[in-house]
Amino acid sequence: MLESSYNGVLVACSIIVAILASYTALNMASRVSNASGKTALFWLVGGSFAMGFGIWSMHFVGMLAFSLPIDLGYDVPLTLLSLLIAIASSAFALYLVCQDKLPLRRLLSGGVLMGLGIASMHYTGMEAMLMNPHIFYVPWLVVLSIVIAIVASLGALWLAFRLREETKRATFSRIGASLVMGCAIIGMHYTGMAASKFPLNSFCGAANSGIDAKWLAILVIIVSLAVFAIALIVSMLDVRTNRLSTSLDDANNELIKLALHDNLTRLPNRVLLGDRLEQAIHRAERSKNEFAVLFLDLDGFKAINDMHGHHVGDLLLKEVSQRLLSSKREGDTAARLGGDEFILLMEPGTPENSAGFAQRLIDKIEEPYEALNNHLKISTSVGIAIYPQDGETGHELMVNADAAMYHAKKQGRNGYCFFEHSMNADVHLQMQMQQNLRNAIDRNELVLHYQPKVVAPNGPMTGLEALLRWQSPDHGFLSPDRFLPLAESSGLIVPIGNWVINEACRQMRTWYEQGHQDWSVAVNLSAVQLEHDSLVDVVRSALMRNSLSASHLVLEITESTAMRDAETSLKVLNKLSELGVSISIDDFGTGYSSLLYLKRLPADELKIDRGFITELAQGNDDEAIIQAIIALGKTLGMRIVAEGVETSDQQALLTRLGCNTLQGYLLARPAAPDVLFDSIAHLTKRAEPTLVTT
């Protein structure tokens, strides 16, 4: 047999080519499995060529490293046939690994076929030398080389299937797998070469007519590296393109989500709700069913937002949203319109089940909240509109559900109300009035009238109570009961209340300069004002702006207002008392005061509610109640004021029972500052014979 030898450099090149071919094969498997349609077909064809050419080039570089003491060459047709076998085997392998599953049976059969294909490629390439006499093969080494080819193919298929996902970890795993696969392929090749034996009188029939071995080595190495480089570069560009496309898709999906969902609560917003409403209308038209639109507005949310800050308010809105989501049925839509307004679309929804759901929702939202160590309670008012009787379009249903919600608020809040057609006119009027009220301060439409408070029984006068009036161009002269509830529900009570405090102080300063240094002016505070963080600063600024001593200002709060949040009220009232302002408990006896809190409140004055005065007569229950209130107030060191005095008998009896101060129509009616002195001349003359008038 002819003695053979190997070129060390080319052997090393064959090993490098084998590893690069393995890495390219794994990379192509990833591209094929992650593509679809025509793109997948493109990667299958291109990947098959790159992978097949890589395996084939490793084989031929290995063969070119082999030398005999005779000239060698390779037959072109057989050489090309071996290349086609390598490409076909690679295509079969890529097809297998791009499937969703690779069961053991398919893996084994695929490994055997691919191994036989690679072995066929190797021995066809050997035949391309056209040796004469024919190459002698050692049978057991041939079998071993085929076994190695099959085992290498099984490992390659399994690794390619497992590592086909595009991740950083998969990239490093592919590098390691390429080393293993490359060594297995090299082992198969050199085992097959070892099985080949050449008789002493052999000569190569392709030495003269085939491809020269020297040029073939250079050509194969250059083309192989070029194919690998092109395949890997295109693959990397495709990966980056896919990642960029995925990022753009994610960004686009996020933009769509942001456009259709509320940023804070992630509930559907007005745009998405409108689409859901239209779909619900179409479904209801086809099925002749009803559905309900529930309009929710939180009661007192603005006061919480103002008192605790917007961050706490946002946390509260998020929790309300979660309660909405946990309460709704599957298929219903919960949405946020903005602020503290929410919509729940019940589909289908009859009046009966929507009423039951509304009550459960009211109870759920009323449960206590915890936000940044703040214990909060809030309620909700719900308006319900039913399709189609309460509206045939989404806009009509929303408007009518809003009208029903407003009616629920008027009825006392924390409840629900179904829409009735008479509500629309009332809602329109209220909305117009609210808009006008918003501009009333700037237009100087708000005025204060003052009602005197006199020392019992009939003077002198010690002070006045400021009473708000609205001279509306559209609605005429309005008393507080006509517009203050609207101001409270809309949040306008805070700027209006601030204006009242400043205007009362300004007027009191005018009277002070006219010589009435012993007078004081009383201003009523609403619950919303008392809960507002800025109240103390507003009072301090009003006193400083008008150069008025705090002793000339009395702030009146109702008993119920003081007890609404007793601890918070206590803190605010103590700060006001530290300024030197007097505190008066108004409408005493009609609420639910805790005597413990009443004792702690820094109050200087108790005002007996007019409800006890109206039917006051000697010997009746009202007299006993008033007598008890007076005794309680004097025990706590407070002045006692009785309001609503309209008869001489009431005046005499209240004086006898111990009231310090009286207030009512019998003594003087409320009047504007410019006509006040004419109406109180009979009172001021007792106090000041030389009264300065304006």
Image (cartoon, helix red, strand yellow):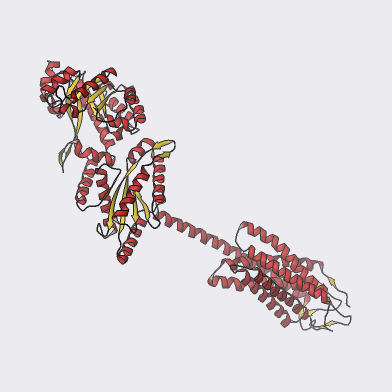
Q: Nearer the viewer, residue 10 or 141?
A: 141
Q: Is residue 61 visible?
A: no
Quarter of the image holding residue 594? top left
Q: Position of residue 389 (x, y in %)?
A: 24, 58
User: In terms of image quadrants, where is residue 233?
Assistant: bottom right
**Quadrant for the C terminus in the image:** top left
Between residue 415 and residue 532, name the one nearer to us.
415
User: At 76% from the left edge and 78% from the top edge, which residue is drawn?
Assistant: 123
Q: Position of residue 676 (x, y in %)?
A: 13, 26
On screen, residue 554 above or below 37: above
Residue 471 falls left or right of residue 1: left
In this picture, is 48 found above or below 443?
A: below
Q: Residue at x 78, y 65 (%)?
A: 12
Quadrant housing the N terminus: bottom right
Q: Which quadrant of the figure has residue 665? A: top left
- Is residue 30 shown to the viewer in this render? yes
| Frontmost residue, 602 versus 538 | 602
Residue nearer the viewer, 153 or 6? 153
Number of marks drawn: 0
Q: Is residue 488 left or right of residue 690?
A: right
Place of residue 654 in the rendered image (x, y in percent of width and height, measured from the top left): 17, 20
Residue 50: percent from left, percent from top? 65, 71
